Image (spheres, rainbow, N blue to C red):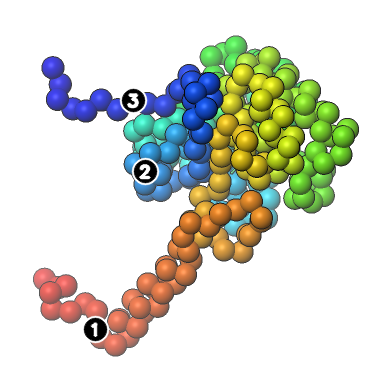
């Protein structure tokens, strides 16, 4: 018998059970090996390799420029850093919207080339054929409704979505369609808390909220925002747990000072 401690891995079934038991699901984004290792080691349930990598890793204004190859690079780095959590990988803009065959081919590349456990895509009724085709190939799919950043040029702003009845009704229909199509969970981004509560209670699959109030079945934040790496983004829904920007700036300034002052390296720091 092996004496290595067996790690119980998080699966889509685990998330389903957590919803049933009323246990909140925790999800954070990560894009590289080192942070994935920290976040998984801390006990997170789900890592999302978000296309927000386009913003926080590459410095683009929107999520639109990131490519499938770049998402594959980020996701395969994350996978090498984790042992326990479920990894969800975003299908980037342009890799699934045109038709369901292309969507499936993109999802298959993610699964084969990264070792990721599931994919996420944005939209409801419009992407239903793709969701069905990907699910029927055995690939778990997470939906994403409300503020869907890949449609920023259609929305025009990053404001709260589904405040008006017509858009709220479409979201009520879309969550049901995604559930019926086989999604294992749905991200609800920046919608009124009351609507998020209502749709979360109407579904058997879990909802993961970001700016959607405390009654979703789980929460997700972008790692760079909650760790204070990126301090320029301060929406109401964000809780910042650290200020790495400030701490890293101070550390770099101390290093510059020590080198200039000929204090680093000292005798014990050389061979
Ligand atoms: O790409 C991302 O980080 C996301 C989250 C904001 C849910 O989709």
Q: Residues within 10 Å of mark 3 (few under 14, many from 20)?
A: few
> Disc 2 or disc 1, which is closer to the eye?
2
In the rendered image, residue 99, in percent from the top left (x then y), is placed at 73, 22
Residue 91 is at least partly visible in this image: no
Asked whether disc 1 touches disc 3, contact meaning CB atoms under 8 Å apart, the reply is no
Residue extending furthest bottom? 261
**Quadrant location of residue 251?**
bottom left
**Which x, y percent locates residue 63?**
66, 46
Which residue is labeled 3 in the image? 8
* Quadrant of the rendered image containing residue 210: top right
Q: Quadrant of the C terminus?
A: bottom left
Left or right of 175, for residue 42: left
Tag in front: 1 or 3: 3
Q: Is residue 5 left or right of residue 151?
A: left
Which mark is on residue 252? none
Task: Say whether residue 9 is left or right of residue 69.
Answer: left
Inter-mark Cα distance, 1 to 3: 48 Å
Q: Quadrant of residue 68?
A: top right
Instruction: Give percent across and percent down for residue 240.
Output: 53, 57
- The answer to whether the beta carbon of the residue marked 1 is less than 8 Å from any atom of ligand 1 is no
Comparing 203 with 6, the one in front is 203
Mark sitting on residue 42: 2
């Amino acid at each position: 018998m092996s004496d290595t401690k067996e790690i119980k891995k998080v699966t889509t079934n685990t998330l389903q059970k957590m919803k049933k038991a009323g246990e909140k699901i925790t999800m954070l984004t990560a894009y590289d090996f080192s942070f994935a290792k920290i976040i998984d080691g801390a006990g997170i349930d789900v890592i999302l390799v978000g296309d927000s990598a386009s913003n926080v890793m590459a410095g683009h204004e929107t999520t639109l420029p990131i490519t499938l190859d770049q998402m594959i690079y980020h996701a395969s780095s994350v996978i090498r850093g984790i042992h326990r959590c479920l990894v969800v990988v975003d299908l980037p803009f342009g890799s699934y919207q045109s038709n369901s065959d292309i969507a499936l081919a993109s999802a298959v590349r993610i699964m084969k080339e990264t070792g990721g456990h599931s994919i996420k895509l944005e939209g409801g009724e419009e992407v239903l054929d793709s969701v069905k085709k990907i699910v029927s190939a055995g690939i778990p799919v997470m939906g994403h409704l409300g503020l869907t950043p890949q449609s920023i040029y259609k929305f025009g702003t990053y404001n709260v979505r589904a405040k008006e009845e017509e858009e709220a009704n479409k979201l009520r229909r879309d969550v049901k369609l995604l559930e019926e199509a086989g999604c294992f969970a749905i991200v609800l981004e920046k919608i009124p808390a009351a609507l998020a509560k209502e749709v979360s209670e109407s579904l058997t699959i879990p909802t993961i909220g970001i700016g959607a109030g405390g009654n979703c079945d789980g929460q997700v934040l972008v790692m760079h925002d909650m760790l204070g790496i990126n301090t320029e983004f301060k929406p109401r829904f964000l809780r910042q747990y650290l200020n790495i920007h400030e701490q890293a700036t101070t550390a770099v300034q101390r290093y510059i000072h020590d080198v200039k002052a000929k204090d680093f390296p000292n005798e014990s720091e050389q061979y």
